[in-house]
Every structure is written in structure tokens, then in C-alpha cells.
Amino acid sequence: MNSCFKVFSLVLILMLATMPAALAYVDSNTAYVAVSGLLSASKEYTHFALCDLDLDGNMEVMISDMVNHGGWQCDVYTLTENGLEFVCTMVPPLGNSLVLKVLDNGQPHWFRVEDEAWQGYQIREISAFNFSIESGCNWNPLYKMEGQGDVPDPQYLYSLEGTPITQQEYEEAMGYFTNLPTPQSVNMADYMFIDDWDMAWQEYSSTFGLY
């Protein structure tokens, strides 16, 4: 279990960027007006998520109008004094694909979770997720399980950053990861604008005070 903690802690130390907040803990009305303006300008957007991807106290908005087997086609905006500004496009996987975890040292960090099955071949991968205004969305793969699951006695491969590990090591790491507190998770299927604004804001505001 100590090795699992060291890996996640090391990733946090190496990847967590500190950036000055443009609008610390923006209020619901300010955010609502900004998102309303963006969506009214383009009626193509349907689903959205509110989150602080770079953990600087400033809100990011993920908005999508398209989903397929590979995930959601999302535009990512950050909220500044001048309103929402486009940063990048990304394709998060289906399901709870981005999760905010609080590590044992009290520091929060985002992780990308991919669960995929295609013609019986299964992949589950946990990656450390990083976001900045300059570089957009990036992730570094950590733990991975893959194999053909629709056969008798399926054999899976397990790895950490591309290096093979045992099933026991993988399961211990997943147990550690699952049990970490999760203040927020992002599933692009959860919220549609305008009907689900209150629920989305409540989820986002529950992370206030973490950093």
C-alpha cells in the first residue's frame, strides 16, 4: 500500500501547477450568466460540467454537443474577468471519466478514468490529469488493466506507467484509489443546461475550501 501512495503523491508533486486565481470561488449568478451567454450564442451545446480543473480557485466549464463510443467531444472554457474564454478541446471517456481525489497528504488532484469494452476486449486505465491555460488538458497513464474478457478463464495484463505488475499489486492500488475521498466526479451525461444548473452548481461548490 505504501508504494501506491508514493506513486500518487509523486505524480501530485510533479504535475500540480499553481496559478493565480482570476476569480476565486465565483458565485452562482456570475457563473450562470457567463454560461448562459455562451450557450445562447450557440444552440449546438447540450451538456455541461462545472469544475476547477487546475485547482486555482477559478472555474472551468466543459460543454459538449456530441457523444460517441470514444467519449464526449468537449470544449473547455475558463472563467475570467472578461467572461468565458476558450482553452482547448478534449474527449473525456464515457461515465465518471474525471474524478477529483484528496490524497493522504490532504492535497487534491484530478484523475482520468477510462473503462472501455469493445468486442469483449476490456480496458481500465487510471491517469493523472493535468490542466493549464497554456497547455490545455494532458494526462499521464498510471495503472492499467486490459484483456479479452468474453472468453473462458480470461487472462488480463496489469501495468504501472507501462511496466508490468501483478494482479495483486494492481488490485491493492485500485483499492487505495477507490477509498480516497472524492469531492467531485465529472460525467458529461449528468447535466443539461438549463434544467440541471442547480445540481451542477451544488456539486461544483462542494469543492470550495479544498485548496
Image: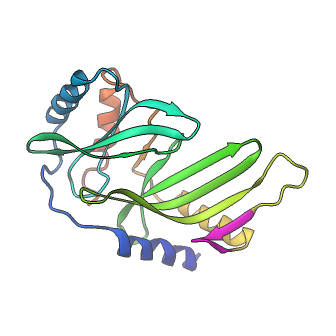
The chief SS type of the magenta part is strand
Coordinates of residue 76 in the picture (x, y in percent):
31, 43
Q: Is residue 186 above or below residue 48?
A: below
Is the N terminus in the top left, top right, bottom left or bottom right quadrant?
bottom right
Q: Answer with left or right where residue 83 lies relative to residue 114.
A: left
Relative vertical location of residue 59 with respect to residue 178 in this rendering, above or below: above
**Extreme residue in the right direction:** 152
In front of the other: 31 or 208? 31
Q: Quadrant of the rendered structure where residue 190 is? A: top left
22 in magenta: no
Q: Is residue 100 left or right of residue 29?
A: right
Decide which of 185, 15 is in the foreground and name it.
15
Q: Quadrant of the C terminus?
A: bottom left
Q: Residue at x 70, y 66 (%)?
A: 158
Residue at x 36%, y 67% (from the top left corner): 106
Residue closer to the observer: 4 or 74: 74
Residue stretch rendered in magenta on the structure:
157-164
Residue 192 falls left or right of residue 142? left
* Residue 154 picture quarter: bottom right
Answer with left or right where residue 185 lies relative to residue 54.
right
* Residue 13 position (above or below residue 156): below
Q: Position of residue 6 (x, y in %)?
A: 49, 78
Q: Position of residue 44 (x, y in %)?
A: 34, 23
The location of residue 178, given as percent across then percent down, is 55, 57
Which residue is drawn at the image coordinates 44% and 61% (left, top)? Answer: 139
| Most distant residue in the left direction | 81
